Image (cartoon, rainbow, N blue to C red):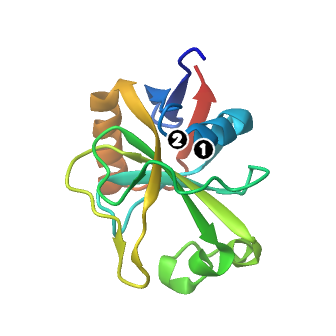
Amino acid sequence: MADRYLTVSLDKRGVRCTAKLLADRAPLTCDAVWEALPLGGDVYHAKYARNEIYALFPAFADREPPLENPTVTPIPGDLCYFTFQGTELGTAAYGYGRDDLARRPVTVDLALFYERNNLLLNGDTGWVPGIVWGTVVDGLDRMAEACHDLWRAGALGETLSFRRA
């Protein structure tokens, strides 16, 4: 199969990068995401994992992918896929303020890690392994600057989008 690429963007800021799907390492996850594209939603900056931005989506795969190509220490440019049960994110402690998260049977978190020294450890639940399904191959420097600005200036009104390149 030919390599597949996607564009990851912060739409309001007009910043994007290109990522390659890691189909050889996470084939089921890559297929699930690829078939669901385009995807976009409110962007959040991580509280616990450090240098991460992400968006939350209702489950979109026929069956959730297994934990393939897992990590708890993502590196710059990693795209990670996380699956959460609704009750895991639907509490006030996470600050989403959206009751629909608690009612969803499954929520998918698609994340981009833009800098080093990340650790997927949550004080409430412990280790949170993610599936590394893609890697940024172009534009990470510009995206990292925009992510840092998002951390400092705020994420309100910003959208994180994933589209086929």
| Label pair 2/1, CB-CB below 8 angstroms | yes
Number of dots carrying numbers = 2
**Residue positioned 64% across, 81% down in the render:** 87
Direction right: furthest residue: 62
Quadrant housing residue 90: bottom right
Left or right of residue 40: residue 7: left
Direction top: furthest residue: 2
* Label 1 secondary element: helix
Report the quarter where the N terminus lies.
Answer: top right
- Locate residue 145, reporting x and y percent: 28, 38
Report the quarter where the C terminus lies.
Answer: top right
* Label 2 secondary element: loop
Q: Which one is nearer the viewer's eye here, 71 or 165?
A: 71
The amino acid type of the residue labelled 1 equals: Thr
- Locate residue 93, reporting x and y percent: 49, 84
Q: Which one is nearer the viewer's eye here, 30 or 115?
A: 30
The amino acid type of the residue labelled 2 equals: Ala
**Residue positioned 52% across, 27% down in the render:** 7
Which numbered dot is residue 29?
1
Above or below, comparing residue 69 to residue 50 in the picture = above
Above or below, comparing residue 104 to residue 88 in the picture = above
Task: Name the residue carrying label 2.
Answer: 26
Q: Residues within 10 Å of mark 1 (few under 14, many from 20)?
A: many
C-alpha gap between disc 2 and disc 1? 6 Å
Quadrant housing residue 119: bottom left
Q: Residues within 10 Å of mark 2 (few under 14, many from 20)?
A: many
